[in-house]
Structures are given as structure tokens and as C-alpha cells.
Amino acid sequence: MIFYDFRYHLSLQESYDRLRLAFHDEALSHATVYNWFNEFKRGRTNLIDDVREGRPSTAMTKDNISVVRRMIETDKRVTYQQIRAWLEIGMSEVHKIFHEHLAISGARWIPHNSTEAQKLRRVDWCREMHERFNGGDLNFVFDIVTADESWIYCYDPETKRQSA
């Protein structure tokens, strides 16, 4: 819209007023319209961002994600520091790759998409437990150990006020 206004020789203020009329509070700022008018005066006609030097805006690329996945598959004990140094990306990006893309929590890889074989194995295990329970073996529940990411503290010391 700004480029259109520029091409039809509208003034900066007229273009800004048209934007405010069309988009109200969501319109671009006066400074942004001013900067674009200056770019168009210099001869710029392409609205795509120019290539810039320096660090890329994001390290969250498919290549980096696949490299991290391969690093974990080959060495389960690989550290954040090693991945960061290898890919030359920040720690926050490594963290995002681990948690948002690879479903890794803590130091263990927890796949959230089970295979058919894993699903069938779980169903078989549940059926076996159901048969044992219906068979009258009530003590079998003491043979089952389960765990997740929860931390449960067995000792909760009293505060000074409680012990007084």
C-alpha cells in the first residue's frame, strides 16, 4: 500500500493517513512509513528483505535439528555444550531443538510417537495384568514399579514454627 501511494505521488503524510484510516491502531508507525518512502526514493522496488551479513536470525533449521538427532542417536551422553560448539548456535536454540522438536526431556529421549510394535506390547502387558488381577493374585501389584518425571519428596522437615 505504501509503494502504491509512492508510485501515485502521494505525500508521506497522505500515505500515513490512509494507513491509519484502513488499519486504525494496527497501522505502521509514522517512522516506518518514512523509512519506506526513503527506500523507494533511493530506487528500491523489491519488498523482500535484503541479505544481511552476520549471524542468521534463527538456528532452528531442519538441518540443525537432524544433526542434533543424529548426534543423540550416536552418543546418548552428548551434552548441550558439545552440540552448541559443533553447530555454533546458542544454548537457548539447543534447548528449543531438544524440547520442542525432538521431545527430549532432561537427559533421556522420550519418544511421544510410539510405534505399532510398542503400542501392541503395551496392550499385551495390560491384558496380562488384567488376567493376573482377575485370577485372584492381588499381591502382584507390589511387583509393579512405575516412574515418570515427577519428584516426590519422602521427607518434609518441619519449619521452626511447627516444631516450637
Image (tube, rainbow, N blue to C red):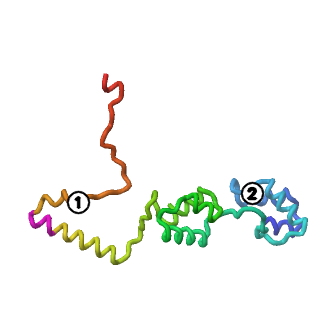
Question: Toward which corner of the image does residue 45 lie, by quadrant?
Answer: bottom right
Position of 110 compared to 85: left or right?
A: left
Q: Nearer the viewer, residue 59 or 41?
A: 59
The residue wearing badge 1 is 144
Task: Look at the numbered disc 1 and give the secondary structure of its residue.
Answer: loop
Task: Residue at 35% x, 24% y: name it.
Answer: 161
Where residue 32 sits: x, y (%)? 79, 57
Q: Amino acid at mark 1?
A: Ile
Rendered-image quadrant of the N terminus = bottom right
Task: Residue at 59% x, 60% y: name it.
Answer: 93
The mark that comes first in sequence, 2 or 1, is 2
Where residue 152 sits: x, y (%)? 33, 47
Query: Which residue range is magenta in the image?
Result: 131-136
What predominant SS class does the magenta segment belong to?
helix
- Which residue appears farthest toward the bottom when viewing the image? 116
The residue wearing badge 2 is 28
Rendered-image quadrant of the C terminus = top left
